[in-house]
Image: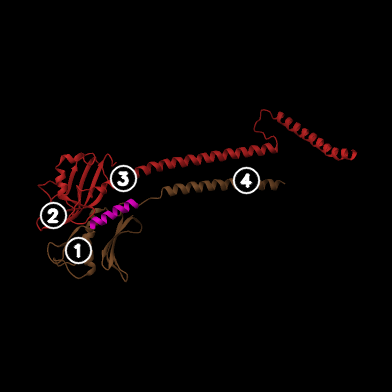
Amino acid sequence: MMSKKAQEEIVGFVLIVIIVSIVLVVFLGIIIRQDRPSSNLESRDIHQFLESTMQYTSNCAIGYEPNYLPLNDLIQECHKSLSTCTSGKDPCTVLESTLSEIIESSFHIALDASTKGYEFKSTYSSDSITEEIISLTKGNCSQTIKGSDLPMPAFPGTISSSFKLCS
Amino acid sequence: MNSLASYSSEPLMNLSAKFAAFKTARFRSLKVHLENFGQPFKILSRGQMKIQQMAFVLVALMVFFAMVALFYFSFSLGSLEKGAQSLQQDEAKELVRKMASTSEFAFTSKDCSNCIDMVKVLVLKDRGSYEDFWNLDFLQIKKVHPSSNEIECEKSNYPDCNTITIIPNEEIGSPPSAFVSLCSWEQSQEFFKCELGRILASGKDLK
């Protein structure tokens, strides 16, 4: 008889513990879901950075001066690899140096800063092939904090440029 | 009739015996209660103990749920404030982004959504009537690349400068900003040149 009473007590205690645990789990779930960071707007900042960067006039003129190409055209020129700049430089070299200069002057990237690295990539893709045109990385890019893609038409395919800032 | 009486008297007998037993038990309980008068937490009988236990558990559960609700509301109020702040910032950034595409700033010589015509901006800078046009306290356009020393642009020193302040304000800390392309006609070589810049704004609508 005493053991039955003890069993009843234990069942009651276990029920209360279960109820309390469920309430705690629900509470923690709500809190964690509310605190989830949203990087949507930050990605729009990066998208705007990419759009503005693609309009930047480079030092590479193709054919004649002053036919200086904006960066979006310079990426296409780098992908085609058919011509050189009037200065004699390779369009891909100019593209790489200009892009890294722009990124360095736009964002504070350092080991002791909140942004520890970046990754820029331009890729050409069509139905048949996918080729990497340019890839720039700096620092430790283990975790992306914000990033965006910008597609551009490049018949018969598209060139997609992506930029990520890493923490 | 007799059979009916014998049939019904037996349960009656049982009932009276049960009532007598109940009276004895109740009397015993009352006696114990009277003996323990003045000691309210002394358990009187098993049933009362059970009820008391249940009452304590219910009170404890109520207190627990009240505490959980209190924590939840304090957290949700905190996040509400954070949410309101971030919404204000989003709105401010949205307005800054829109500025580049307004007809007062837009560079229309090529199809570019966030290109700013630097000549238009230089002209706007000298027109005091535009200071109240956007309901802003501060509006500035800054060249990011190619980087140079901070020199305020005037008609006399353009393009050897990097900042155009349309609505000046010395008390602005770090206002919302957005990347833009700063485009202008390159006089020496006769072509349209675009550089990278930022538009910074702050005001009554942008906090």
Residue B132 lies left or right of residue B46; in this view the side is: left
**SS at mark 4?**
helix
Report the disc number at residue B185: 2
**SS at mark 2?**
strand
The secondary structure making up most of the magenta span is helix
Mark 3, mark 4: which one is toward the viewer?
3
Tell me whether the residue at label 1 lies in contact with that at label 3, contact meaning CB atoms closer than 8 angstroms: no
Q: CA–CA distance between discs 2 and 1? A: 22 Å
Q: Identify residue type, mark 3.
A: Glu
Position in image of residue B80 (x %, y %):
40, 42
Tell me whether the residue at label 1 lies in contact with that at label 4, contact meaning CB atoms closer than 8 angstroms: no
| Residue range of the region highlighted in magenta in the rendering | A40-53
Mark 4 falls within which chain?
A: A
Residue corresponding to mark 3: B91
Mark 3 falls within which chain?
A: B
Magenta includes A52? yes
Give the colour chain B carries in the figure.
red
Question: Closer to the camera, A127 or B186?
Answer: A127
